[in-house]
């Protein structure tokens, strides 16, 4: 389970580095992990924490 969270966060950060916004990042990741795997709030949280330097 913890590995899945880390992997998902890395995918979100990868999408963010491709200059995707939160909604686009979630849409990119959903096909790979399933419709319920990544929601907008999770992407927003991960990107927000990263920008604050707390990751």
Image: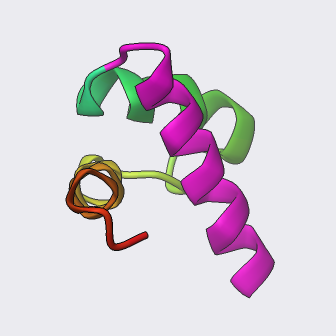
Q: Furthest residue to the front?
A: 53
Residue at (63% x, 50% y) in the render: 10
Task: Indicate the quadrant where residue 1 lies.
Answer: bottom right
- The residue at the point 37 percent across, 14 percent down is 19
**Percent from the top left, x then y, of residue 32?**
72, 35
From the viewer's side, name the closer residue of 27 and 11. 11
Q: Is residue 54 above or below residue 41?
A: below
Q: Which residues are magenta?
A: 1-20
Reply above or below: 11 against 21.
Answer: below
Specify whether 27 is left or right of 48. Answer: right
**For the point 42% across and 29% down, which residue is it?**
16
Establish if 45 lies above or below 27: below
Q: Is residue 14 left or right of residue 54?
A: right
Residue 28 lies left or right of residue 43; in this view the side is right
Q: Quick one: quadrant of the C terminus?
A: bottom left
- Residue 1 appears in the rendering: no
Look at the image and tell me whether residue 34 can be seen. Answer: yes
């Amino acid at each position: 389970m913890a590995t899945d969270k880390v992997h998902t966060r890395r995918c979100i950060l990868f999408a963010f580095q491709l200059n995707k916004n939160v909604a686009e990042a979630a849409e990119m990741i959903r096909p790979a992990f399933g419709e319920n795997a990544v929601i907008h709030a999770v992407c927003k949280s991960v990107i927000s924490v990263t920008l604050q330097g707390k990751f």
